[in-house]
């Protein structure tokens, strides 16, 4: 049965004569240079580990489907992270199946042969002339180094399987929901907690490109200051670096000047810049392999902190430094946040904003009026990586060598907070770095960007 074509409402009809003409006269179709992807041997090890965790079971992991942005325009596709982790593939509507025997088969939608039908030149979603060439079966096998079959040959009805659900509704419908699906989802997150050597290389590339993006932003400050949407100007500058050196940004960039920095996820980025304010920028380059950096710097737009800005910044810097010092194998995941919050509580009390002992403030949570959220998270294919892992192995677990995480304490003094002296209102500060846990501590992946206020001022001066 031929699937209906994805044709726009304003597309012209095709005559029989044109259809016949379009089926002939083509040279052999190739996607270009095809070779095994560097991830292939690592992905094979991961699939073997997954099969060993669920021996004798069928496991189904879809890549995901295209999502409509508007009418007949789709968002740029990004595969589900678990699928990418296990295959290194990046096309939509494909499905990885690990059979009870342990064999992995990748069911793909190959590009349509030009001598068959009209998909290749009429289908807006999958047609080669519209969306570019998808690999054929032979090319897919070469690229991903596993057996590939046409998606139309996928047979799941009546076959017991664990399915990563909520990724592809058509796949969900083929297999009756079972109690083991949630366990599969959790394990697919948990197996990504410890990064292998290949992943660490991709993360280093993403972080290094991110550092260059921040340098671009500092160089662009004079031009952005003159624009009514200076935040958006800087967002575009960083986005250019992300597209040149990677796939895109790993998440919507936060470019927050002045009191906008007090909004934790400020992504409107439509404000002006003022030289007497701070700029909080939270951004990360996503590598072509989808591993993302996540870095935040809070910078004086003028190039120098004033006395109040420096006082607030130094407290966050001290909190982050204390948090980083706790990172080592065997430490509890929550330890670094608690270390940062102890420093924050001490500082807020010394400033007269809060009263009581550090322990009493931590217990009451009153300090959270000024620092709302946790101080970090795992990082990898997702900016908030491994989010479906069980609490006992992540949030309530302990750190291991190979864990990659962010440390990002902050202070957010809302502009209308009457508990604050006027000079603090509207100041938002976050410092975020990416680190990998090593055998004897942790390595700062984002150490190429300065953290200390003196270093920031010197760095900005060299880029002016």
Image (cartoon, rainbow, N blue to C red):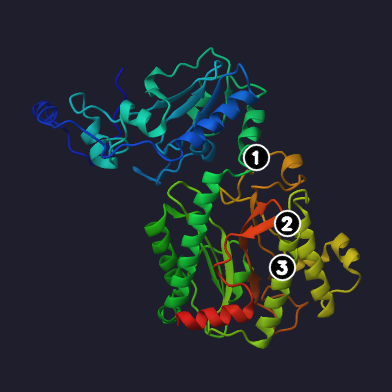
Dot 1: element: loop
Task: Tell us which disc is closer to us: 3 or 1.
Answer: 3
- Measure the alpha-carbon separation of dots 1 and 2: 22 Å
Q: Quadrant of the N terminus?
A: top left
Task: Determine which quarter of the picture holds residue 13.
Answer: top left
**What's the mark number on residue 388?**
1
Dot 2: element: loop
Compared with 11, 376 (above or below) is below
Task: Tell us which disc is closer to us: 1 or 2.
Answer: 2
Compared with 330, 58 (above or below) is above
Q: Quadrant of the C terminus?
A: bottom left
- Which comes sooner in the sequence, label 2 or label 3? 3
Task: Determine which quarter of the picture holds residue 228.
Answer: bottom left
Residue that carries the numbered disc 3 in the rendered image: 321
Closer to the camera in the image, 334 or 21: 334
Considering every residue shown, the one lying at the far bottom of the view is: 307
- Measure the alpha-carbon separation of dots 2 and 3: 11 Å
**Place of residue 22 in the rendered image (x, y in percent of width and height, measured from the top left):** 13, 31
Whether residue 426 is visible here, answered yes or no, is yes
- Which comes sooner in the sequence, label 1 or label 2? 2
- Measure the alpha-carbon separation of dots 3 and 1: 29 Å
Mark 3 surroundings within 10 Å by alpha-carbon count, few (fewer than 14), some (14 through 19), many (20 or more): some
Residue that carries the numbered disc 2 in the rendered image: 327
**Place of residue 433 in the rendered image (x, y in percent of width and height, measured from the top left):** 61, 62
**What's the mark number on residue 180?**
none
**In the image, 201: left or right of 119?**
right
Whether residue 278 is visible here, answered yes or no, is no
Closer to the camera in the image, 326 or 310: 326
Point 44% across, 35% down: residue:
65
Dot 3: element: helix
């Amino acid at each position: 049965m031929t699937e209906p074509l994805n044709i726009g409402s304003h597309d012209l009809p095709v005559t029989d004569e044109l259809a016949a003409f379009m089926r002939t006269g083509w040279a052999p179709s190739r996607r270009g240079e095809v070779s095994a992807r560097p991830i292939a041997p690592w992905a094979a090890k991961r699939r073997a580990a997954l099969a060993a965790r669920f021996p004798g079971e069928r496991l189904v992991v879809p890549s995901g489907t295209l999502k409509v942005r508007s009418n007949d325009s789709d968002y740029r596709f990004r595969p589900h992270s678990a699928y990418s982790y296990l295959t290194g593939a990046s096309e939509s509507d494909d499905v990885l199946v690990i059979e009870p025997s342990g064999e992995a088969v990748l069911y793909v939608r190959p590009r349509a042969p030009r001598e068959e039908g009209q998909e290749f030149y009429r289908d807006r979603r999958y047609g080669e002339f519209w969306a570019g060439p998808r690999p054929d079966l032979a090319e897919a096998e070469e690229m991903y180094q596993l057996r590939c079959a046409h998606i139309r040959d996928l047979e799941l009805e009546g076959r017991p399987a664990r399915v990563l659900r909520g990724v592809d509704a058509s796949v969900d419908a083929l297999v009756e929901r079972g109690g083991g699906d949630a366990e599969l989802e959790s394990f697919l997150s948990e197996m990504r907690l410890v990064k292998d050597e290949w992943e660490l290389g991709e993360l280093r590339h993403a972080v290094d490109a991110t550092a260059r993006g921040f340098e671009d932003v500092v160089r662009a400050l004079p031009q952005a200051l003159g624009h009514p949407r200076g935040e958006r100007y800087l967002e575009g500058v960083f986005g250019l670096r992300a597209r040149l050196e990677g796939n895109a940004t790993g998440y919507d960039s936060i470019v927050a000047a002045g009191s906008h920095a007090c909004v934790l996820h400020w992504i409107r980025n439509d404000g002006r810049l003022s030289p007497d304010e701070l700029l909080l920028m939270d951004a990360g380059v996503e590598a072509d392999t989808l591993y993302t950096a996540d870095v935040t710097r809070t910078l004086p737009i003028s190039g120098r902190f004033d006395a109040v800005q420096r006082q607030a910044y130094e407290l966050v810097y001290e909190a982050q430094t204390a948090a980083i010092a706790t990172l080592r194998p065997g430490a509890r995941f929550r330890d670094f946040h608690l270390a940062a919050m102890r420093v924050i509580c001490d500082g807020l009390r010394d400033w007269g904003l809060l009263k009581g002992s550090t322990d009493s403030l931590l217990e009451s949570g009153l300090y959270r009026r000024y620092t709302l959220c946790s101080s970090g998270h795992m990082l990898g294919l997702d900016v908030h990586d491994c989010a479906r892992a069980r609490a006992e192995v992540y949030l309530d677990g302990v750190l291991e060598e190979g864990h990659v995480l962010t440390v990002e304490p902050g202070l957010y003094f809302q502009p209308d907070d009457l508990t604050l002296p006027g000079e603090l209102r509207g100041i938002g500060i976050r410092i975020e770095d990416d680190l990998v846990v090593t055998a004897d501590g942790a390595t700062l992946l984002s150490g190429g960007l300065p953290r200390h206020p003196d270093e920031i001022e010197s760095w900005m001066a060299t880029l002016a």
